[in-house]
Amino acid sequence: MILLTTYHLSHGYRRFSLLHRHTYREILKDITLNLHSGESVALIGQSGSGKSTFARTLCGLEVPAMGEVVFRGRTTKQMNQRQKHEMHRHIQMVFQDSVSAVNPRKTIRDIIAEPLRHLADMDKHHQEQRITELLLSLDLKPEDMDKRPAQMSGGQLQRVCIARALALQPELVILDEALSNLDLVLQIQLIDLLKEIQRKTGTAWLLVTHDLRIAQRFCDRIMVMDNGQIVEECHTGDTPHFQHPASIRLKEAILPPLPTMVTQS
């Protein structure tokens, strides 16, 4: 089932200057694609290709200059305030820098409970149950609830951010370079956890990354972005046969494939 669609999506920014005319820089150019329920898709490309701008546009943080974003068969331009609120509940985003994404004065309990307090009709008892469930699903401990961000490692804090994104049982979670700051072992462990969560809940993942290895291990489908456009798409069941120059550059730049198993001591 198609969850989210974009039609001829274009977006950019105006540059303002006291000495020169206003200029417009186009970031996204005529993007049309479908994301399906329960699938994992990678959006890969070099820095500056437009990946993060596209991700922010999908979840409503940016309003496209042209084109449409369609969620559950309804365009965002047609949505009333309640419908937009519902869309934001079902599309969540996790950013690369977990430290700046959380309030350092809050406990882990408060950080994960934030969407539950504001967007869910849930009393404190059920909030506590949901937070415990989320922590366990991401290999964290219930006693971590009383810690503050500074007491968590980088990998643990990124899991907290993912737990917060999953709190409302969204249909789509966008991971904007959310695995890039982790070391190899943590990347593999977290990918395996996210796959298991997907198997149990049917959550769809959109992984924004520049690392083809992560995309091939985690995702069912890879879309390559270059200069604000989707230039190539392939499935990861077989070895991808890239043809576009931007895809070939990414393939040539990667390190050896991620190992299939990690032995824990």
Image (cartoon, helix red, strand yellow):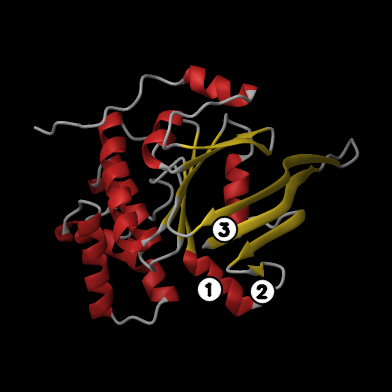
**Which numbered disc flags the more N-terminal residue, 1 or 2?**
2
The x, y position of residue 139, in whole percent, is 20, 51
Q: Looking at the picture, which amino acid does disc 2 mark?
A: Met
Which residue is at the far left? Answer: 265
Which residue lies under the disc numbered 3?
59
Q: Looking at the picture, which amino acid does disc 1 mark?
A: Glu
The x, y position of residue 195, in whole percent, is 32, 49
Which residue lies under the disc numbered 2?
79
Q: Nearer the viewer, residue 104 or 83?
A: 83
Look at the picture and state if 29 lies above or below 115: above
Q: Nearer the viewer, residue 106 or 89?
A: 89
State whether residue 180 appears in this view.
no
State whether residue 47 appears in this view.
yes
Q: Is residue 262 left or right of residue 43?
A: left
Q: CA distance from mark 3 to mark 2?
A: 14 Å
**Which numbered disc flags the more N-terminal residue, 3 or 2?**
3
Mark 2 crowdedness (10 Å alpha carbons): few <14, some 14-19, many ≥20: some
Local SS, label 1: helix
The x, y position of residue 71, in whole percent, is 59, 65
Q: Is residue 212 left or right of residue 64?
A: left
Which residue lies under the disc numbered 1?
86
Point 56% across, 26% down: residue: 242
Local SS, label 2: loop
Q: CA distance from mark 1 to mark 3?
A: 11 Å
Point 62% across, 57% down: residue: 5
Q: Looking at the picture, which amino acid does disc 3 mark?
A: Cys
